Amino acid sequence: MEHKILNFKVLIEQGEDGIYVAKVPDISGCYTHGKTVEQAMGRIKEAIQVCIESN
């Protein structure tokens, strides 16, 4: 199986509660959160894959 490498801009913002929210502006509804930036980044990679596969 051949894999294609895609690059997306990820925006991470810290909420007032200290939780980091990661979202991909180019993919509608693609967002997640984490207690740390690293956790949010790991989760957004999974979210991107799910969002792309569902389209």
Image: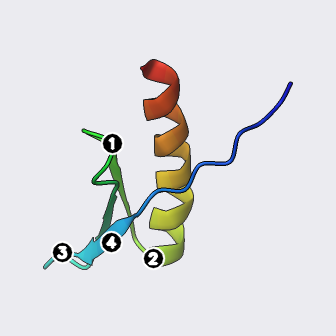
Name the residue that disc number 3 marks: 15
Q: Is residue 43 left or right of residue 26?
A: right
Seen at 40% across and 71% down, the residue is 35
Mark 1 surroundings within 10 Å by alpha-carbon count, few (fewer than 14), some (14 through 19), many (20 or more) = few
Name the residue that disc number 1 marks: 27
Looking at the rendered structure, the secondary structure element under dot 3 is loop
Q: Earlier in the sequence, mark 1 or mark 4?
A: 4
Image coordinates of residue 41 in percent, x first then y, are: 50, 65
Image coordinates of residue 15 in percent, x first then y, are: 18, 75
The residue type indicated by label 4 comes to: Ile
Q: Is residue 24 left or right of residue 46?
A: left
The residue type indicated by label 3 comes to: Gly
Seen at 45% across and 20% down, the residue is 54
Mark 3–mark 4 Cα distance, whole angstroms, equals: 10 Å
Mark 2 surroundings within 10 Å by alpha-carbon count, few (fewer than 14), some (14 through 19), many (20 or more) = some
The residue type indicated by label 1 comes to: Ile
Q: Earlier in the sequence, mark 3 or mark 2?
A: 3
Name the residue that disc number 4 marks: 12
